[in-house]
Image (cartoon, grey):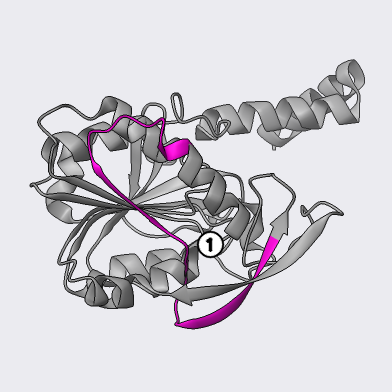
Amino acid sequence: MARDRFKRALGSLIWALLGRRRMVRFGQFLVNTGRLDILNDLAGNGEEVIQEVVLARANQPLVVFDVGAFRGWWTERLLRIARPAHRALEIYLFEPSKRNHAILLERMSTFPQNASLHPVQLGLSDRFGDGNFFVAGTGGTNSLVKHHILTPDVTTEKIQLTSVDLFCREHSIDTLSLLKIDTEGHDLRVLEGCKQMLSDHRIQVAQFEYNQLWIPARCFLKDAFDLLQGHGYCVGKVTPRGVEFYTSWHWELETFRLANFLACLPAWKPRFPQIRWWREA
């Protein structure tokens, strides 16, 4: 009772000092900082560390899928940290938009030439066939999910879809060293298109983006946990301080805030720097 009274009194004091709006903003800042939910910055959000670990520890040849490549920034960063020893590095860049694919091809000419690059004008999903791709100007929110963030100049483009399982079978790709997915809300469908590769443990490490666009996609992080942990993968969140691995899904994780999650085979888990979850720390 005394603790509850203290909390109410402290809340009333902060409200009086800051006002309700600033109080909420300050609270969000503290929560985001504590949860290690930060801005989407390759150099500072932990993604570069994932790239470094995979480059250093994966068996050659290294095969990487950049799904939702857009302008190719993620691949460009990977190439810049790759050492000359990684000569057997192959990267497939999937960008379904005709316009953005053309821009990607132009940008690739400036990338470090230390890998075999394969630009692919296909969308990855859980099925083969046609799809409606919603293109929002030149921004990075293009998606197979129609959502409220799209700008007024949105156009719809018919694209060809396939799945990771189908593509790997058709191109005789046995193992993926790293599967990176950034498809603005369609990430779970891409993972569902990997079921055979996941079942056979032929994907060593997978990284996917989770954000507010999972809401219009009618997807939950729990769905990804069920799929990935059901196939024996360890799942955690990529943070600047290391990967925050979880024994299982928990409702506290379902924030719909921007974050990158990692799935890896158990043998890979100790290779990544780690931080304990705040609930367990």
Rendered position, 173 above or below 208:
below
Q: Which residue is drawn at 22% across and 34% down?
A: 114
**Nearer to me, 93 or 56:** 93
Would you say residue 273 is visible in this rendering? Answer: no
Measured as percent of width and height from the top left, residue 216 is found at 69, 66
Q: Which residue lies furthest to the top in this view?
A: 17
117 drawn magenta? yes
> SS class of the residue under badge 1?
loop
Q: In which quarter of the image is residue 82?
A: top left
Give the residue pinned by disc 1.
96
**Nearer to me, 10 or 239:** 239
Rendered position, 21 above or below 116:
above
Q: Give the range drawn in magenta.
A: 107-134
Measured as percent of width and height from the top left, residue 192 is found at 40, 74
Rendered position, 209 above or below 128:
above
Mark 1 burial class by Cα count in 10 Å: few <14, some 14-19, many 20+: many
Left or right? Give the position of 30 relative to 58.
right
170 drawn magenta? no
**Which quadrant: the N terminus?**
top right
**Nearer to me, 86 or 107:** 107
Q: Residue at x 25, y 61 (%)?
A: 233
**Nearer to me, 250 or 161:** 161
**Which quadrant: the C terminus?**
top left
Q: Residue flagged by tag 1: what amino acid is it?
A: Pro
Measured as percent of width and height from the top left, residue 36 is found at 50, 32
